[in-house]
Image (cartoon, rainbow, N blue to C red):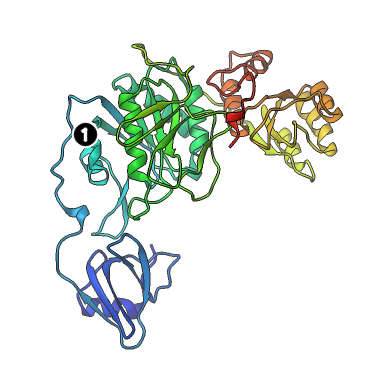
Amino acid sequence: MAEYSENVKRVLAEQGISVGDRVLVERPDSAYEGILMPNHEFSDPEVLIIKLDNGYNIGVRLVPGSRVKKVSGKAPQEKRKIRLSFNPRLPGVSLITTGGTITSRVDYETGGVVSLMSPEELLSLVPELADIVFLREVRNPFNEMSEDMMPWNWQALANDTVKALNESEGVIITHGTDTLHYTTAALSFMIQDLPKPVVLTGAQRSSDRPSTDAAMNLLCSARIAGHSDIAHVGICMHASMNDDYCNFILGTRARKMHTSRRDAFQAINDTPLARVWPSGRIEVLKKDYRKRTKGEARADAVFEEKTGLLHAFPGSPEPLHAMVDKGYRGIVIAGTGLGHVPRPWLDPITRAIESGAIVCIAPQTLYGRLNPFVYSRGRREYEQGVLFLEDMLPETAYVKLGWLLGHEEYTEEEVKKKMLEPVAGEISKRSLPGGFV
């Protein structure tokens, strides 16, 4: 961690101030009071980082005439003793944390961020959970930023989820949002005979911001995990920019569609499974959902890492050649239009297939369905042996292909056949108007 400048450290030392103390910074034109946070590599070492009471951080430069004072007063809320407890008569659910901001809090003694690792700590973030579910346990198989999640993380998470699921009424998994839709797709395939809800959720805004979506997402997730009869893997997140209700979206049909909006996750080529309100109201939108059973889930957590995903683009097919040279066994291409690639890509596709790779095409448009028979280019690709994946999302297709190839007992023809058969709702028989937003 970076440090403040020698000049700033001298000013703080003179007043007996350390990171985590409540301070008052007075400048000739303004004054700010809050918690002193540590400097980091992105901060100017001459600028104090102060967390205000509204949750936002600001930087205050010490200009001539500035004064910094240590303030005594009540301890921050995070340091108060938590007196709430969970009710064991409510539905018992397990929470699995994998990293991300949704189950993190600021440690005001160090100024850093730490994970909430016990049910009691989680109540400091969302005390209303105690009225909804009995949180049996908090599992933490690993801590990874969403963008750092890898297939082996999916495998570990699938195994851990099955263990938790068979001891609970449902499971809530907290996860960073960037690759959340990859993970939900992976769990949708890697958890077989699913008898109860597996609800993944995250936050677009951190829990120390007034506009955070963390609390409502967790509350709605608890409603689905503990009180619904929907036995699917899915994502439960804000349905709009407002704090009204969340959508519960099938894991193989969800995708992050915005970098920062609270309603970033949308159902693609599908409608959400349900709408859920923090108050407990659940409105089921898909009548053909899988319902709860008394059985036990089992893990089928395999993955072939020599699987790749490429976007077709107006340029050289060198990335495709590189995958073939590296011995990739499966390649998903996000094709343009109804499933097309540029002319220079046709020969490398033939080379890939002749090398033994399975080549699939999914819609780059995301919305809509592929058809290889409308244009000559599609017919050419089809004749080469390319699999056209109907309305399957490219990310879901990549995960499914890697999962199928991970089964050493499957022949190439069996993998191809299963890629075109729905396993977890990833392919629909026909496109419906409600699947496009």
- Residue 56 at x, y percent in the picture: 35, 62
Reply above or below: 424 against 361. above
Q: Nearer the viewer, residue 337 or 313?
A: 337
Q: Which residue is mark 1?
A: 131
Q: Quadrant of the N terminus?
A: bottom left
Q: Quadrant of the C terminus?
A: top right
Say which residue appears at 36% left-offset and 20% top-offset. 229
Q: Is residue 359 left or right of residue 142?
A: right
Q: Residues within 10 Å of mark 1 (few under 14, many from 20)?
A: few
Reply above or below: 72 against 287. below
Q: Is residue 45 visible?
A: yes
Q: Is residue 301 visible?
A: no
Q: Nearer the viewer, residue 107 or 125?
A: 125
Q: Is residue 356 left or right of residue 186?
A: right
Name the element at disc 1.
helix
- Residue 382 at x, y percent in the picture: 79, 23
In this figure, what is the number of numbered marks?
1
The quadrant where residue 145 appears: top left
Say which residue appears at 39% left-offset and 66% top-offset. 2
The quadrant where residue 338 appears: top right
- Residue 122 at x, y percent in the picture: 26, 42
- Residue 183 at x, y percent in the picture: 49, 33
Q: Give the amino acid type for the residue marked by disc 1 in the picture.
A: Asp
Q: Is residue 85 left or right of residue 8?
A: left
Reply above or below: 51 against 231. below
